[in-house]
């Protein structure tokens, strides 16, 4: 069975291969774009076109709040590990706590600035 499939593939490739490399017919038309691509000037955000857009914003704000709470908890846990590690003679825990504080602080910065970045992107696209 495999030899039949191999023979069929060997016979079909020289015939169909060059056909795949040909330009498509008819030529695609691009409309307003002279390059023939997609017209990106017609794409813009419209929150009124989305049903129940207020629900989306409530979910986004809840996710933002939970992200900030998680980042603050990470900073607190890292600070506890960083301060308690040397007391018990475990410098590995202290080092991991220090790195946890840096990572959680970076996450808090990214999560906290997400709304301003999204607002900037929406204004830039409009």
Image (spheres, rainbow, N blue to C red):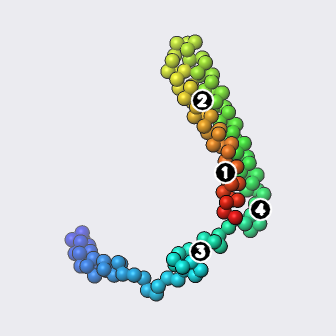
Residue at 61% across / 34% down in the picture? 104
Which numbered tag is attached to residue 52? 4
Which numbered tag is attached to residue 117? 1
Q: Say which of marks 1 and 4 sits in front.
A: 1
Of the numbered discs 2 and 3, the one sitting upstream in the chain is: 3
Question: How many dots with numbers?
Answer: 4
Task: Report the Cα–Cα distance between label 2 and label 1.
Answer: 24 Å
Q: Nearer the viewer, residue 22 or 3?
A: 22
Of the numbered discs 2 and 4, the one sitting upstream in the chain is: 4
Q: Say which of marks 4 and 3 sits in front.
A: 3
Q: Is residue 83 above or below residue 21?
A: above
Instruction: Give the class, few, some or many, for how many residues have Cα within 10 Å of label 3's Cα (few <14, many ≥20).
Output: few
Q: Is residue 22 above or below residue 121?
A: below
Residue ranking furthest to the front: 34
Instruction: Give the class, few, some or many, for how many residues have Cα within 10 Å of label 4's Cα (few <14, many ≥20).
Output: few
Instruction: Give the class, few, some or many, for how many residues have Cα within 10 Å of label 2's Cα (few <14, many ≥20).
Output: many
Residue at mark 2: 101
Q: Say which of marks 2 and 3 sits in front.
A: 3
């Amino acid at each position: 069975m495999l030899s039949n499939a191999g023979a069929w593939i060997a016979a079909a490739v020289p015939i169909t291969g060059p056909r795949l490399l040909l330009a498509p017919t008819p030529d695609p038309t691009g409309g307003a774009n002279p390059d023939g691509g997609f017209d990106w000037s017609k794409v813009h955000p419209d929150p009124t076109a989305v049903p129940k857009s207020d629900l989306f914003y409530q979910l986004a704000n809840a996710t933002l709040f939970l992200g900030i709470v998680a980042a603050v908890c990470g900073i607190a846990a890292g600070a506890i590990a960083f301060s308690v590690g040397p007391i018990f003679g475990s410098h590995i825990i202290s080092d991991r706590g220090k790195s946890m504080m840096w990572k959680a602080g970076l996450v808090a910065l990214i999560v906290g600035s997400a709304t301003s970045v999204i607002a900037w992107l929406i204004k830039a696209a409009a």
